[in-house]
Amino acid sequence: MTPLLDVTDLLVRHGDRTVVDRVSFQVDEGETLALIGESGAGKSSTALAVLGLVGPEPGSSVRFAGQELTGLKGRRLRALRPRFQPVFQDPYGSLDPRAPIGRTITEPLRVHGRPAGAARAAELMELVGLDPAYADRLPHELSGGQCQRAGIARALALDPRLLVLDEPVSALDPSVRSGVVNLLTGLQKRLGLGYLFISHDLDLVHHVAHRVAVMAPGGRLVETAPTHELFASPRDPYTKQLLGWAPSRP
Amino acid sequence: MTHASSADPLLAVRGLRVGIDGTEAVRGVSFAVRPGQATALVGESGAGKSLTARAILGLPPHGARISGSVRLDGEEIAGAGPSVYRRLWGRRIAYVPQDALAVLSPVHTVGDQLAAAVRSVARVPRAEARRRAVAALDGVGIADAARRARALPHEFSGGMRQRAVIAMALVNGPGLIVADEPTTALDPRVRDQVLDVLAQARAASGAALLLITHDLELAETRADEAVVLYAGRVAESGPAHQVFGDPRSPYTAGLVASKLPGWRTTGTARRGQDSLSATARTPQAPLPAIAGTPPSPLDLPRGCAFAPRCPLAAQVCRDEEPAPAATDPAGPRTVACHRAHQLPMPAVMLYDLQGLQDLQLREPTG
Ligand code: SF4
C-alpha cells in the first residue's frame, strides 16, 4: 500500500546550517507518527517542509499519496494542499483576532472556492465539540481549549487526509487538555486521518502515537520504532538519554 | 521588628482579594507558607495564581485593587507601596519569573547585575560584591563562574539564565522566594536540572518557596504543600502528596483523573487510580476528562464556580458558593465543596464513566 505521506532524504538548511539532515519516514492512513526530540532539534522545520512552507534542498522527496510535492507549483500544488493541514501550538495566535470563529473555521473553504455557509461551519464545530452557537464569537471570548478546537475545525474544513500537529495541546490548561487529546484520537478513528505529531511530551506521545521517530540535535533521525518498542527498549544512545535511561549531559 | 517562632508562618495570606477593571480575579484566597517550606500555588490560566503572587510581591498590575491581609514575618504588607517593598525586595522576599529576561538587563554582564543586587542591600566594597556574585553563580551549578560572570545574559542558554536568576534571587538571603512558572519555557531535562538547583540552593540557605505553576506534577514532586486555585478561590489545600494522591475536591480529582498515564508507569496501576478500567490505560483510548472550560472572571456562574463542569453538582452548588473548610478538625487539609463528604473513594472515580454509572450519582432529593 502506498503510504499517505512518504518523506525520503529530506534535507533543510537555514543559510549554511543543516536543520533537517536527510530524514526519511512514512505516515499511513489512520496512523500517528510522533516526532520527538529536544527543542531546536529540527522537528518544527520538518513539519514546515512537509507542509511546503519551507523549501527543502534538491534531492529531498515528499510524496503525498504517491504524488511528489517538492517542485510542484501553481494549480497542481493548490489541488493537493487541502489534503494535508496544519494544527499549531498557540490556539490564540493561529486565529484571526478580529474574525468571528465561525468565519475563521470556514476560511479555507472560501480560499478554495467551496461552499462555506453557516451550515458547514456548524457541522465542523459539532465535529470538534464546539457549540455552534459560538460561531459569532471572537477568539478572545473563548478559552484556550475552545480556540484550539476551532483551530482543529479549520484544519478539517477541506476534508484533509493528513494533519501535521505541532505541539497541539502543550499550551492548553490541564483541565481541558485531555478533552482535546480525546478529540484528536477520536477524529482519527472516525475519519481515518494520518497524523504527523510533533511533541516533546513523552507521556503524550506514548498515549497517542502508533510509531515514534526520534530526532537528535542537527536534525538527524536516530531511531524510528513502534511506540511500545521504542519506550520499552530504545536502541540508540540518544533515545536512551532522551528517555532518561542514560545519564544526561551536564 | 517582629519575632516569629519557627511554628509561625513566614507568609500568611488571609482573604486576599485582587480586583482589576471592576472584576475580581482573586476572591478571598487564604493560605500560609512556613519557614523553609515549599508551597505550590496551582491553577490554570485565569485562576488568579499569578495575580496572587504579584500582589504578595508588591508588583500588582496597574490599577489593581488589593484587600485582605498579607503578612510577611508578621508584618502586614497587603497593598503596601514601593517604599515598603523596597525594604523587602531581595532581603526578605525575592522573585523568580518565568522569563529570565524580565529581570535581567540585556546590556550588563550577569556578574555586574548580581554584584549590583548585592550592593543595593549591603554596603560592601565592589570587590566583595563581585566575590559574592561569583559565589552565588557557583552555588547554582554554573561551572567556571568567575569567567561566566563576565558574559551577557543572551550568551547563556535558557537553563543557565534561569540559574542566574535563581542566584540573583538568593544572593541577599531572603526568607521567601516567589517563583512564577520558573521552568515552563525550558526543555524537560533542563527543567529538572534547574529545579534540582533551586531545591539545593534553598536547602543551603533555608529559604521558603512559593511556587506558582499550572503543572500538577511539578507541584506534587517539588512542593511540601499545595494550594489549588479555581476561578479565584482556593478549591483545596494541604500536604501536596495528599492533595494529589487523594484529592478531596471534585476539581482536583478531575485534574488528577485526566492526567496522561505516564509512559514509565503504564501497565502498573497508578496510585489512586486503581478503579480506572484497564482500557483507560490503553494507548489512544479516551482519557477521563473534565467537561467544559474554566469560567472567565467576567462571567462567573452563580454558586460554586466549578458547578457547570462538576459531575457531583447539586442544587445547593448552584445556589451557594462553598467556603473552604477543614476536612477533619485536627488535619492540615481544607476543601471548598458542599459535597466533599459524599465523594467516592478514590475521588478520581468521579471521572470514570463506568464508575459514575455504578455509583449512580444522583442529586440528593429533599
Ligand atoms: S460544591 Fe458542588 S459543584 Fe462545587 S465542587 Fe463541590 S460538588 Fe462540585
Image (tube, coloured by chain):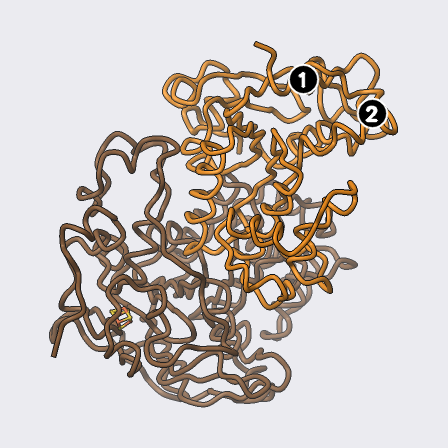
Q: Which x, y percent locates residue B322?
A: 27, 79
Q: Which x, y percent locates residue B314?
A: 23, 72
**For residue B60, above or below residue B130:** below
> From the viewer's perspective, is the residue at label 2 or at label 1 nearer?
2
Q: Is residue B145 left or right of residue A191?
A: right
Q: Which mark is residue A76?
A: 2
Question: Which chain contains the residue that carries disc 1?
Answer: A
Q: Nearer the viewer, residue B279 or A137?
A: A137
As measured in the structure, the alpha-carbon distance from the residue carrying label 2 to the one carrying label 1 is 19 Å
- Quarter assignment of residue B59: bottom right
Ligand 1, by image quadrant, is: bottom left
Q: Amino acid at mark 2?
A: Arg
Q: Nearer the viewer, residue B261 or B290?
A: B290
Q: Residue at x 80, y 12 (%)?
A: A59
What colour has chain B? brown
- Quarter assignment of residue A217: top right
Question: Which chain contains the residue that carries disc 2?
Answer: A
> Where does label 1 land, which residue?
A7
Q: Which x, y percent locates residue A203?
A: 42, 36
Q: Secondary structure at mark 1?
A: strand
- State which chain is coloured orange: A
Q: Residue at x 26, y 69 (%)?
A: B313
Q: Residue at x 53, y 21 (%)?
A: A238
